[in-house]
Amino acid sequence: MREINTALITDTVEKLCIEANLHLPCDVKCAIKKCRECEDGNLAKNILDDIIRNYEIADAENVPICQDTGMACVFLEIGQDVHIVGGDLYEAIHEGVRRGYTNGYLRKSVVKDPVRRGNTGDNTPAMIYVDIVPGENIRITVGPKGFGSENMSAIRMFKPSAGLQGIKDFILETVENAGPNPCPPMVVGVGIGGTFDKAALLAKKALMRPVDSKNPDPFYAELEEEMLEKINKLGIGPQGFGGKTTAIGLNIETLPTHIAGMPCAININCHVTRHKTEVL
């Protein structure tokens, strides 16, 4: 049994909150540059040039890539042979977010109550997701989620009779309805199966995958490729001004589900698809 102190978890979450907001993952940068090479319209090219310039400035000057530094989504994979000591795990994570957003001078965007509002002042609480896995490590991923894109997400409880075509139509419908609002080029996370809540979580986890990765199931890998191509034919383009690049990635995650259902959730992210991981 390996012991990990909550103080280390707090320090790690603080660091990841800052780094994720300042530095875009390499796979996202590469995808944006690749799409820039494919565009043939001057407006689309210029917008992608501005996006590239923006993340290069963020890297060089250690400033946030976007003014919306998001709600901190913290994913934990905790080895079953780990004993966490030194305090409450969730409070350790919240404290890490609190320090990260304060010490990193990141915008604090969380309100105390969904209806009555009122800023919490420190970007807590974090949204925490925990998986227990084999081993004696803790894998922590922080994915700050802005709400210009989060607001464009959707879930639908299909009956099995809707079939694959129903899912395809839903993906395209959701992206088309989103239009320029999520600051395209976007990344699209799709969750299929499980229950109402699990489908949504699958979609969010899909956004944590590299955009150049493929689902290990060839059926879904082919579907990812097909739907990304169809989305880019919608012509929404960078920032909604038209072009070939509406999305730079589409990832699908699945789970078994009930015989009577086929839940499908779509979590949209802007081109600033931020996430940073560390293993303790």
Image: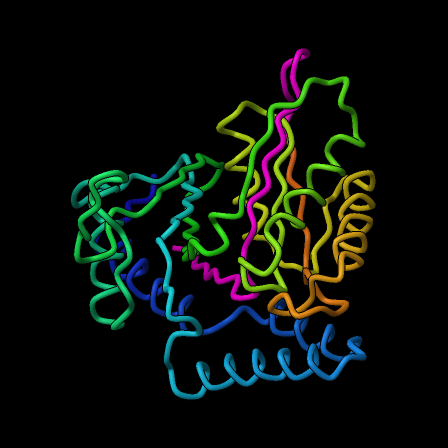
What residue is at 66 percent from the left and 11 percent from the top? Answer: 260
Residue 5 visible in the snapshot: no
In the image: residue 72, left or right of residue 121: right
Coordinates of residue 241 in the picture (x, y in percent):
66, 70
In the rendered image, which quarter contains the C terminus?
Answer: bottom left
In the rendered image, which quarter contains the N terminus?
Answer: top left
What residue is at 35 percent from the left and 40 percent from the top? Answer: 82
Extreme-top residue of the structure: 260
Coordinates of residue 164 in the picture (x, y in percent):
79, 30
> Is 257 a magenta residue?
yes
Residue 218 location, quadrant: top right
What residue is at 26 percent from the left and 64 percent from the top? Answer: 100
Instruction: Give the number of callouts.
Output: 0
What residue is at 63 percent from the left and 31 percent from the top? Answer: 264
Coordinates of residue 49 in the picture (x, y in percent):
62, 84
Residue 163 location, quadrant: top right
Coordinates of residue 268 in the picture (x, y in percent):
56, 50
Magenta-highlighted residues: 255-280
Residue 279 location, quadrant: bottom left
Is 20 above or below relative to 57? above
